[in-house]
Structure formats: C-alpha cells, structure tokens
Image (cartoon, grey):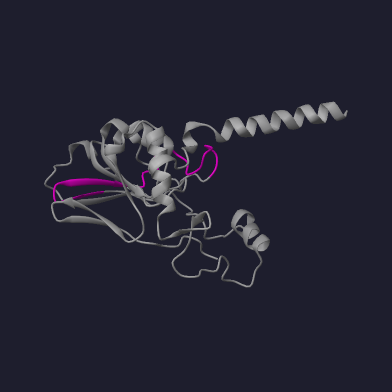
C-alpha cells in the first residue's frame, strides 16, 4: 500500500509542477530586469515593501476566520439578482477623434483620449483566475471578448493579479497592441508571451511615462486587501 501512496503523491506533485509551468503563469524577472528590481528603493529582503507600514488584517478576526469569510461566507447582496444592464459598443468603428471611456466590467475598460487608445486590465475570457470555473464575471458584465478589441496604442496593466492580467486575453490581442505599460518586473511575463522589450514600459512606484498628446501615466502605490 505504501508504494501506491508514493505513486499517487508523485503523480500529484508532477501534475502541480506541470500546471504551474504553463505559459499562462509567465516568468519571474531575470538578467537586467532582475537587477533593476533589486536596485529599486522599494525592494528589500527579497521582495517589494510597502512604503508605509501596512497591517494585513484590520479587523479583530484572525487570518483563518477572515479567509473563511472570503471563500465561504454567503452575502445576500454579494451578487446581483438579475443580469447587469449593458450596452455593447462596436469598438472597431470608434473614430480616433472621439474621447470615450467604455467599461467592460470589474477593472477592465477602454480609454480613448487625445487620439490615443488605452486598454486597461482587460480580462475578457470569462474568468479572472488560472482556471475557467473560478472568479467568473457577473451575468451582463461579460459582454466583450478579445475579438472585440481593435488596435490599441497602450495596454495598461495596473498589477499582476489574475483578475487584472489575463494571459488568454493578452495573447489573443497581442498583434493589435502597440506598447505595454506595467509594473516593474511584470514585463518578464510579456516577453515570455512573445512581446519584444521595445514594446514594454515598466514603471516602479512614483515613476511616470510621457505618452505624448498631453498624456502621462503615473505609477503610484496602492493597496488591494480589504479586511
């Protein structure tokens, strides 16, 4: 029986290794990019540090209790009872001289201003996670698909979480993206996915990128945890 348990465990470990080494998981920084990360004033003790001391938990609940609430607790008002009303715009026929903002749901939207077209955090493949059945959008907030996205001047990724950086969407719109603006170190993912280093604008906190046409992108620190 012991050898059967060993085989099952070996198969499980092999499956996990194969799963996390898929292209969708990107790559960790290396070479000159890794040196830039290590030289960042925000990088110490092997990781980026918050500029201000930040508590991970702000309630009296412990970590396990908070995690259980996030994963298991049902909130009667946590999901809309009906599909979210939406209007689907034909993005391919937008005139470049129009200033528009189109929200796709969650944190994904298209901003067209001063003749520049920016696509922010597009997650358009039906799931904000590495597997298709977790973190799905609310009905009505899933109107757009990668094929609906026209040529983009700048793809802006606010941070490296699954519900903001979606491998499948990025790969499907890759040939229609001019440049990518992302956080320091995240560019390694994009290089693995076939983007060139010339296409990447990687910003550390408090850095900026001047795009022309009166537009400047600022990279500022922010927190996403909510308990």
Question: Is the C terminus in the top left, top right, bottom left or bottom right quadrant?
Answer: bottom right
Asked whether 186 or 124 is in front, the reply is 186
Residue 185 visible in this rendered orientation of the protein: no
Q: Is residue 205 above or below residue 131?
A: below
Name the dominant secondary structure of the magenta segment: loop
- Image side of residue 149 versus residue 166, left or right: left
Residue 51 is inside the magenta segment: no
Q: Is residue 66 above or below residue 112?
A: below
- Image side of residue 139 versus residue 217, left or right: right
User: Which x, y percent locates residue 7?
Assistant: 77, 27
Q: Residue at the spot x=21%, y=36% of the render?
A: 92
Q: Quadrant of the rendered structure where residue 200 is?
A: top left
- Image side of residue 129 versus residue 125, left or right: right
Q: Residue at the spot x=38%, y=36% of the render?
A: 169
Asked whether 70 or 201 is in front, the reply is 201
Q: Going by the picture, which residue comes out furthest to the left?
A: 97
Q: Quadrant of the rendered structure where residue 119 is?
A: top left
* Part of the protein shown in magenta: 111-134
Residue 126 is inside the magenta segment: yes
User: Which x, y percent locates residue 4?
Assistant: 82, 26
Question: Is the N terminus in the top left, top right, bottom left or bottom right quadrant?
Answer: top right
User: Which x, y percent locates residue 176?
Assistant: 26, 33
Asked whether 205 or 34 is in front, the reply is 34
Q: Quadrant of the rendered structure where residue 142 is?
A: top left
Asked whether 73 or 45 is in front, the reply is 45
Q: Residue at the spot x=65%, y=69% of the render?
A: 61
């Amino acid at each position: 029986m012991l050898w059967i348990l060993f085989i099952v465990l070996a198969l499980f470990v092999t499956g996990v290794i194969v799963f996390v080494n898929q292209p969708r998981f990107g790559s960790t920084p290396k070479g000159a990019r890794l040196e830039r990360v290590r030289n960042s004033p925000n990088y110490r003790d092997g990781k980026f540090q918050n500029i201000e001391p930040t508590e991970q938990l702000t309630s009296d609940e412990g970590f396990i209790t908070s995690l259980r609430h996030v994963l298991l607790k049902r909130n009667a008002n946590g999901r809309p009872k009906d599909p979210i009303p939406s209007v689907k715009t034909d993005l391919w026929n937008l005139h470049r001289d129009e200033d528009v903002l189109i929200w796709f749901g969650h944190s994904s939207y298209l901003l067209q201003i001063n003749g520049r077209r920016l696509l922010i955090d597009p997650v358009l493949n039906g799931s904000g996670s590495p597997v298709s059945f977790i973190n799905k959008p609310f009905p009505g907030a899933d109107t757009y698909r990668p094929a609906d996205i026209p040529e983009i001047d700048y793809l802006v990724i606010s941070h490296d979480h699954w519900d903001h950086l979606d491998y499948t969407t990025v790969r499907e719109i890759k040939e229609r993206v001019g440049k990518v603006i992302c956080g320091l170190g995240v560019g390694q993912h994009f290089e693995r996915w076939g983007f060139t280093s010339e296409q990447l604008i990687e910003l550390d906190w408090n850095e900026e990128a001047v795009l022309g046409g009166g537009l400047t992108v600022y990279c500022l620190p922010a927190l996403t945890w909510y308990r």
